[in-house]
Amino acid sequence: MSTTIKGLSKSDVQYDGSSLRVAIVHARWNKAVIDALVAGAVAKLKEQGVKDSNIVIQSVPGSFELPLACSKVIAGSHVQAGSSAADLLGLNFGMSSPSLNKPSSRSGTPAPQQPTTVSMPSQPFDAVIAIGVLIKGSTMHFEYICDSVSHALMRVQLDTGVPVIFGVLTALNDDQALERAGLGAGANKGHNHGEDWGLAAVEMGYHSRRWA
Ligand code: DLZ
C-alpha cells in the first residue's frame, strides 16, 4: 500500500457538534459527484454529533451561484421568528412571504402580517459548507469560475464572520473529480473530500462560537 504525506490529519481534539447548526449549499452541475460529496459531508457532521434538524441543505444551479447563496443563507439565519421557511431558504430573502401580503378579500387592503410558524430553527448557522464540482472544459470558463468563486467564498466568510468551508473541486478531468468523491474507477476509489469538509465545518463552527 502506498503512503502519502497529503491530506487532512486527524485532530487531537474530539469536537462536539451537538449544538451546532450547519448549512450545506451545493451546486447541481456534475450531480453524481456532488451527491457523493454532500453525503460524505452529512455523514461526518452526524458522526460529530450534529443533529439532523440542524443540518440545512440548499441547492443552486452551478458553482458560480455558491457565494451569493452562502451569503444569503447566512443572512437569513439571522432573521428572527416570523420569517417563513422559504425566507430562510433564500426564496424570499429580505421580503415578506408573498402569502402574508395577500390583500384581505373584502377591503383590498393588505392583511396584517402574522408571524408564521417557522419549521426550522432561526438561530444563526455556525458554519456553511459550499460544495461545487468544476471540471475543466475547452474554454476559459473554468478558470474564471474557479477564480471568482474561491475569492468570493473567502470574502463571504471574512465579511460575515461565519466559517465557509471551501468544498469546491476544481478538477482537470472527470477522473480527478470522481476520485475526490471516492468514486474512482478500479482499485483506487480515491477519497471522499466531503467527509473532510464535514469535519472542518464542525471544528470551525466550534471555534468560531468561542472566538466571537
Ligand atoms: C456553465 C458551467 C460550466 C460550463 N461548467 C460548470 C461546472 O463544471 N461546474 C459548475 O458547478 N458549474 C458550471 N457551469 C455553471 C455555472 O457555474 C453557472 O451556474 C452558470 O454560468 C450560470 O450563472
Image (cartoon, grey):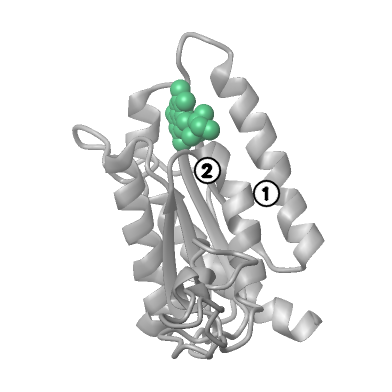
Nearer the observer, 202 or 58: 58
- Label 1 near label 2: C-beta < 8 Å? yes
Residue with the mark numbered 2: 168
Residue at horizontal 47 percent and vertical 65 percent from the top: 198
Secondary structure beneath dot 1 equals helix
Is residue 135 among the parts visible in the rendering?
no
Nearer the observer, 13 or 122: 122
Which residue type carries mark 2? Answer: Val
Q: Quadrant of the N terminus?
A: top left
Disc number placed over residue 132 in the picture, else none: none
The location of residue 176, given as percent across then percent down, is: 39, 30
The location of residue 182, given as percent across then percent down, is: 31, 46
Q: Quadrant of the C terminus?
A: bottom right
Residue at horizontal 57 percent and vertical 88 percent from the top: 112
- Disc 2/disc 1 C-alpha distance (Å): 10 Å
Task: State yes or no: Cβ of the residue under disc 1 lies below 8 Å from any atom of ligand 1.
Answer: no
Nearer the observer, 87 or 60: 87
Residue at horizontal 49 percent and vertical 61 percent from the top: 91
Residue at horizontal 44 percent and vertical 74 percent from the top: 99
- Binning the other alpha carbons within 10 Å of mark 1 as few (below 14), some (14 to 19) or many (20 upward) gives many
Q: Is residue 62 above or below residue 76?
A: above
The location of residue 78, given as percent across then percent down, is: 66, 78
Image-based side of 69 in relation to 198, left or right: right
Secondary structure beneath dot 2 equals strand
Image-based side of 156 in relation to 143, left or right: right
Residue 53, quarter of the rendered image:
bottom left
Q: Is residue 144 above or below residue 119?
A: above
Residue with the mark numbered 1: 153
Residue at the extreme front: 107
